[in-house]
Amino acid sequence: MIDLIPMNQLDFENYCNVSIKDYAQEHIRSGNWTEDNALQIARETFDKLLPKGLNTPGHYFFKIENQDSEQTFGILWFAIEERQAGKLAFLYDIKIYP
């Protein structure tokens, strides 16, 4: 069985440190950004998307853990937004570690 455990502030900061770098590298590889400014743009993008960090309303961050061993083997980030058609969920990131 697996559990979704809400991230604490330290988990969130560690997640962001890795994810911002990964996000910048993805955009460099795809040719969208140059190496000179990719990290800055990635940080600005995260800051704009998550103005209150872990406590940004509508955004949810979880560690994915093995219920038996309590070992973290992934993360999940999604958001829920109200639109005219009703509530919509958007999956921002899911990672499963090897």
Image: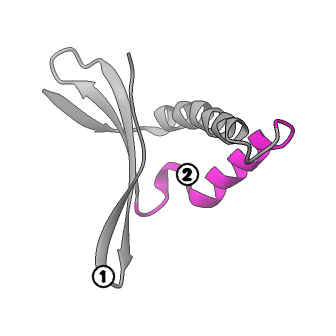
Q: Is residue 54 above or below residue 73?
A: below
Left or right of residue 67: residue 61: right
Residue linked to disc 2: 53
Q: Quick check: marks 2 and 1 in contact, CB under 8 Å?
A: no
Tell me where residue 28 sits by quadrant: top right
Front one among 52 and 32: 32
Looking at the image, how many numbered discs can be counted on the residues? 2
Magenta residues (range)? 35-58
Residue 43 visible in the snapshot:
yes
Q: Nearer the viewer, mark 2 or mark 1?
A: 1
Front one among 14 and 95: 95
Residue 38 position within the rendered picture, expressed as x and y whole percent measured from the top left = 77, 42
Tell me where residue 34 sits by quadrant: top right
> Label 2: few (<14), some or many (≥20) within 10 Å?
some
Q: Quadrant of the N terminus?
A: top left
Of callouts 2 and 1, which one flags the residue occurring earlier in the amino acid sequence?
2
Residue linked to disc 1: 85
Q: Is residue 54 magenta?
A: yes
Tell me where residue 50 sits by quadrant: bottom right
Q: Secondary structure at mark 1?
A: loop
Q: Main secondary structure of the magenta part?
A: helix
Residue 10 position within the rendered picture, expressed as x and y whole percent measured from the top left = 51, 32
Q: Secondary structure at mark 2?
A: helix
